Image: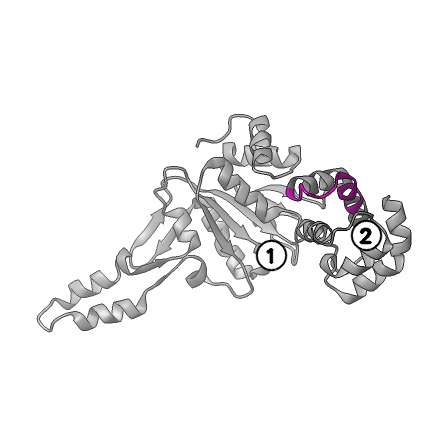
C-alpha cells in the first residue's frame, strides 16, 4: 500500500483500525511520510504513542520493526553483532588444507551476521518500506542518542568487515519518549515533533465505547469523566488509557450497573497501581462518583 494521499485518508484509516486520534496526529503522520523525516512523539506513558506506530504500519501495509530502548543499550543489541558460535564451528570444520584467508573472509560475510532492528530497517528490500519504531528513546544514554544522529541523517550503517550499508529505501521512523530525561536539540532538529496528551473526556469516552462495546454507554461516559477528574489530582502515576480500558472491562465483568462509591472503591486496584494514589482517590470517591453522574 502506498502512503495515503490526504490527511483525511489517514484519519479514516486510523478510525478503521480502531485508533481514536486527533487531527494533529494524522497531520504529523502525513508530513512525516511526505517529507521522509522521523516523527518524534512525546507524552506520558500510556497515551498511545507506541500504538500509533503499530497502527501506522497497518495503514501503510508495512512491516513494523521495533527497537525497545533501555539504559545501557549498545550497538550489539541495536544494530548488529557477529554470530560467534557459528563462526567458531565453521573454522573447526575447515580442513587443514583449506585456504585460511578464504575462511576468514567467509566467516565475516553477511551469512554470519546477526541483524538487529536498526540494521534490519536500513538494509531492507521490502516491497513497502518498513516502519521503524525506536521506543522510549529517553531510556537510552547520551552515547546511543549520539549514534542515532548519524543514522537518522544519512540512513546508513558502517560495518568494518563489510563496509557501509546505505538504505536503498528509507524506512518510516517513529521515536517515542516518556520524557524520563531531556533529549538533545540535535535529535529534535532531525525530527518532526508531536506531543500526545491524555485524551479529553469525550475522546476517552469514544475510546471506551470502541474498545469495550459491551459496556453501557452511560457507564462508559461516567468512567471517562471519573478518570479525567482524578488525573488532575496530582497522582504519582495517573491512569493510562490502557488502565482505563482495563477498569471498564472489570466493571463489565462484575456486572456493575450503577457508577457509585462502592463500585469505585472495590475496583480501584485495577485503575491505580500505587497505594498512596489509591488512598488519595478513595478518600474523594464519595464526591467524585456523584459528580461523574
Q: Position of residue 131 (x, y in %)?
A: 47, 43
Residue at the (75%, 64%) spot, across then down: 274
> How is the model colour-coded?
one colour
Q: Which residue bears the numbered disc 1?
A: 138
Q: Residues within 10 Å of mark 1 (few under 14, many from 20)?
A: many
Q: Which residue lies most toward the left here?
A: 97
Residue at coordinates 54% horizontally, 41% vertically from top-left?
Answer: 55
Q: Is residue 242 left or right of residue 80?
A: right
Q: Is residue 286 left or right of residue 219?
A: right
- Residue 190 shows in the view: no
- Residue 225 location, quadrant: top right
Contact flag, marks 1 and 2 (Cβ < 8 Å): no
Name the residue nearer the viewer: 164 or 108: 108
Quadrant showing the C terminus? top right
First in residue order: circle 1 vs circle 2: 1
Vertical order, 277 against 256 (above or below) = below
**Where's the N terminus, which quadrant?**
top left
Give the residue at x 58% y 48%: 50
Question: In the rendered structure, does residue 75 fall within the stretch colored magenta?
Answer: no
Q: Quadrant of residue 217?
A: top right
Marks 1 and 2 sit apart, C-alpha to C-alpha, by: 27 Å
Residue positioned most to the front? 255
Q: Is 268 left or right of 63, judged from the image as shown?
A: right
Which residues are drawn in magenta? Answer: 211-223
Q: Is residue 180 above or below residue 209?
A: below
Crowd tier of the residue under label 2, counting other residues whose Cα lies within 10 Å: few below 14, some 14–19, many 20 or above: some
Judge by depth and name the residue closer to the eye, 270 or 213: 213
Q: Is residue 64 visible?
A: yes
Residue 290 spot, x, y in % from top left = 89, 48
Q: Secondary structure at mark 1?
A: helix
Return the mark for residue 230.
Answer: 2
Residue 247 picture location, percent across and down:
72, 53
Amino acid at each position: 500500500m502506498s502512503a495515503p494521499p490526504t490527511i483525511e485518508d489517514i484519519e479514516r484509516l486510523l478510525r478503521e483500525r480502531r485508533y481514536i486520534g486527533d487531527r494533529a496526529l494524522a497531520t504529523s503522520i502525513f508530513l512525516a511520510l511526505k517529507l521522509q523525516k522521523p516523527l518524534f512523539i512525546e507524552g506520558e506513558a500510556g497515551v498511545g504513542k507506541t500504538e500509533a506506530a503499530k497502527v501506522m504500519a497497518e495503514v501503510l501495509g508495512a512491516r513494523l520493526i521495533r527497537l525497545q530502548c533501555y539504559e545501557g543499550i549498545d550497538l550489539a543489541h541495536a544494530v548488529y553483532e557477529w554470530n560467534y558460535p557459528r563462526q567458531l564451528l565453521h573454522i573447526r570444520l575447515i580442513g587443514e588444507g583449506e585456504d585460511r584467508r578464504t575462511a576468514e573472509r567467509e566467516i565475516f560475510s553477511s551469512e554470519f551476521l546477526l541483524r538487529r532492528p536498526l540494521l534490519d530497517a536500513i538494509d531492507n528490500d521490502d516491497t513497502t518500506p518498513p516502519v521503524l519504531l525506536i521506543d522510549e528513546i529517553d531510556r537510552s544514554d547520551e552515547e546511543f542518542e549520539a549514534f542515532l544522529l548519524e543514522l537518522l541523517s544519512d540512513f546508513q550503517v558502517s560495518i568494518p568487515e563489510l563496509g557501509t550499508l546505505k538504505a536503498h529505501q528509507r524506512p518510516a521512523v517513529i521515536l517515542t519518549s516518556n520524557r524520563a530525561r531531556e533529549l538533545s536539540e540535535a535529535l529534535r532538529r532531525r525530527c518532526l515533533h508531536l506531543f500526545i496528551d491524555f485524551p479529553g473526556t469525550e475522546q476517552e469516552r469514544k475510546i471506551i465505547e470502541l474498545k469495550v462495546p459491551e459496556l453501557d454507554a452511560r457507564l462508559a461516559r461516567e468512567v471517562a469523566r471519573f478518570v479525567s477528574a482524578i488525573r488532575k489530582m496530582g497522582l504519582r502515576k495517573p491512569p493510562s488509557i490502557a488502565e482505563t480500558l482495563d477498569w471498564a472491562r472489570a466493571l463489565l465483568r462484575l456486572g456493575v450497573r450503577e457508577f457509585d462509591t462502592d463500585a469505585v472503591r472495590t475496583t480501584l486496584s485495577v485503575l491505580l497501581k500505587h497505594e498512596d494514589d489509591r488512598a488519595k482517590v478513595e478518600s474523594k470517591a464519595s464526591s467524585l462518583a456523584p459528580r461523574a453522574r
